[in-house]
Amino acid sequence: MKLEKVTSIHGRRYDDACGTALGLELVGERWALLVVRELMLGPRRFGDLRASLPGLSANVLTQRLEGLEAAGVLVRRRLPPPASVQVYELTPWGREAEPVIQALGRWAARSPDHDPTLPLSPVSMMLSLRTMFDPGKAGDARLAIGFRFGETAFLVRVAEGQLTVERTDPEGADAVVAGTPETVAAVIYGDAAGAPARARELLGIEGDAEAFLRFAGWFELPPKAERPAA
């Protein structure tokens, strides 16, 4: 019996057995991988996703969510009362894409065209910490740093050379940082010597400010690739 070809979720196929080709069929459509990124730290409502990806129209977001659901990357579910709202959540297999997103982010950050001052979503900022964390710099330190971006809050814990991020109220953290993702990135990824001044100017810090500055020293963007000679 001759097997029928399965149509890709976007109606197009590369007809290539390489897993990279199938990966592009799954998440290669514009915005698809960024939708996956925004779900990496837990389920989100449709409106939350639109707010985090302001350049994405409601119509295209609906298409991407439907395609990713059909591919088994995410599921829809309704939160129990009193919330009773529909959310989108990655499947266990969908969450396995995080190392792919991290590797792509590290590679692309080496581009001479990478502009770290462009807008960031809160989730993107938190995932960048998981991507750029240097356990060698942290050593055996144990710290808990909270981040507040408006109504969205995260708790970042570092212990035994591991960094974890949880979307939760950061009560009890050594320090709680309030600002925008862009201002947090400016402090953490800017030059180390100017970090204290930028922190005072750009961020609100409750608790142990020195602990946060020590934490900020454990991250660094990769060196830029050289452009080929013209």
Image: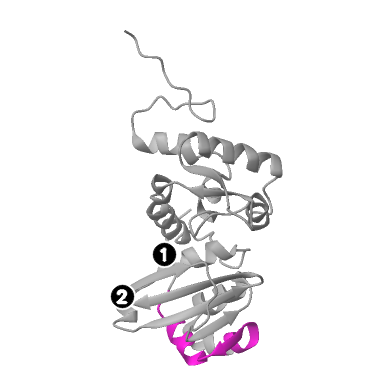
Across and down, in percent, residue 40 comes to 48, 56
| Badge number at residue 161 | 2
Is residue 88 or residue 78 the one in the foreground? 78
Q: Earlier in the sequence, mark 1 or mark 2?
A: 1
| Above or below 17: residue 191 | below
Q: CA distance from mark 1 to mark 2?
A: 13 Å
Mark 1 against mark 2, which lies toward the viewer? 2
Secondary element type, mark 1 = helix
Q: Position of residue 81 (x, y in %)?
A: 62, 55
Question: Magenta stretch: residue 214 in it?
Answer: yes
Q: Which residue is mark 1?
A: 131
- The amino acid at mark 1 is Thr
Location of residue 161 (image quadrant): bottom left
Q: Magenta stretch: residue 187 in it?
A: no
What is the x, y in percent for residue 129? 45, 69
Magenta extent: 198-219
In this rendered view, identify the residue nearer to me: 137 or 107.
Answer: 137
Q: Secondary structure at mark 2?
A: loop
Report whether residue 143 is seen: yes
Q: In this picture, is 50 found above or below 155?
A: above
